[in-house]
Image (tube, rainbow, N blue to C red):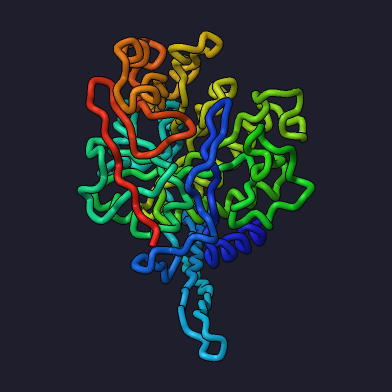
Amino acid sequence: MVALTQLALVALALGAPVTARYRGPHHSHHHGGWNPDISRPASESATAVPTSSRLAETSNGITTIVTTTVTSVLTSGYDSGSGTETTTTEALVTSTTTKETSTTTKATSTEASAPATSSGSGIESNFKPGVKWDICIHHPIKHDSVDDLVPVQAEVWDIDLGHAHEFPNMIPMMKKAGKFIICYFNAGAVQSWDEDKAQFPDDIVGKALDYPYGVDEFYVDIRDERVLDIMKARLDSAVAVGCDAVDPDNVDAWAQDGDDPTGFSLKSSDYATYLKNMAEYAHSVTTQEGNPLLVGQKNAPEIAADLVSTLDFAVLEQCRGSSVDTETYSFCSDFQAYIDAGKPVLQIEYPPSVSASDGTLSSSDKTFYCDAEDDDKNFSKVMKWASAQLDGWGEYCGGKSYRTGEAEYV
């Protein structure tokens, strides 16, 4: 398994992975994720992508730590014979070994339930219930300067992992402004534009998602170890590009329409196990800030109680239900366990009046989505257009609407 993971690490160092479309609890949609046909901005051509893995073994109070770093170096040139630009990539692998005295003590049950972040200074220590956040995955964020990061009060940002690779200066600028970065990717399906789609053998690719996405998105068998290995490589890629946490989507397929929506008869317990295994690996790698990579739970209230002790936060869509659709239901209360454990719950609501009125909420929607309720007490709430339009528009309860600028492809 270590060998497979290291091979995937090298492969992804030579070509960054793509993420998937963002998907709500009952619908999915396209976003501007990684597209191999889109050229990188010339001013942001990445020349080196480091990734690292860390193994530790303790004996007689001495911990031996072996850190392996894979760095891909991209060199551009010109072939005068063919008249074309060329790019060569070299993977440099280095290992370092250190020894330190073990002073670890057994954690109490309270400590074990806390997020996996360190206790250092900065936003990591503020990633807790009530933190201000924003999500923008349908377009890359304008990042010419820290002044582009609107709303300024958002300390946590959920962005697309593919955009982070296409615009390698985006996360560094956000980090300059002191932001905590969550990177979104599709963990439950493979898409036609995924950079790593060839790594999914046919026997682990199942049914297409509901219309109109069936032509380019297909569920995968998340029980298969090969799927987990691909996701581990994506987690390595997230660390390399500067993410502090990940937002893996499409992990509630058992709840979709039909008797067997995936083609693999997957159960909620399968997804719970899948996310636990993903989190175990994520917590074993180290971000650029020196913290474990955090993993969030996307919707799926049925498995929240099983995952709260393992995962680090939650991202919910429409947990209050809909102000106009009586068939929807509220599931916010299922995630109060995260709040009780000191872990943030990042809540997105989609007021129908926003789409109908170009950014002005109706008074009835303000009441429905913003009046205080115990079910989502201390959640971090933001209102957006719709699940299919998670772009730069947003509004906080009690505040004014805002728009985050869009980075341009050149």
Residue depicted at x 45% and y 65% = 49
Q: Is residue 14 left or right of residue 113?
A: right
Toward which corner of the image does residue 189 lie, by quadrant?
top right
Residue 209 spot, x, y in % from top left: 66, 35
Name the foreground residue: 164 vs 53.
164
- Residue 275 position (above or below residue 322): below
Toward which corner of the image does residue 402 lie, by quadrant?
top left
Name the foreground residue: 309 vs 250.
250
Residue depicted at x 52% and y 79% = 86
Q: Is residue 80 left or right of residue 199?
A: left
Taking the view exactly as shown, the residue that stands out farthest to the left is 147
Taking the view exactly as shown, the residue that stands out farthest to the right is 203
Quadrant (top left, top right, bottom left, bottom right) of the C terminus: bottom left
Taking the view exactly as shown, the residue that stands out farthest to the bottom is 81
Residue 386 spot, x, y in % from top left: 44, 29
Residue depicted at x 47% and y 68% = 96
- Residue 156 position (above or below residue 199): above
Residue 167 spot, x, y in % from top left: 39, 58
Q: Is residue 63 left or right of residue 373?
A: right
Name the foreground residue: 291 vs 100.
291
Q: Is residue 30 left or right of residue 226?
A: left
| Residue 343 visible at all | no
| Residue 138 visible at all | yes
Quadrant (top left, top right, bottom left, bottom right) of the N terminus: bottom right
Residue depicted at x 54% and y 64% = 15
Residue 70 spot, x, y in % from top left: 51, 67
Count of marks, rendered view: 0
- Residue 378 position (above or below residue 402): above
Name the foreground residue: 357 vs 163.
357
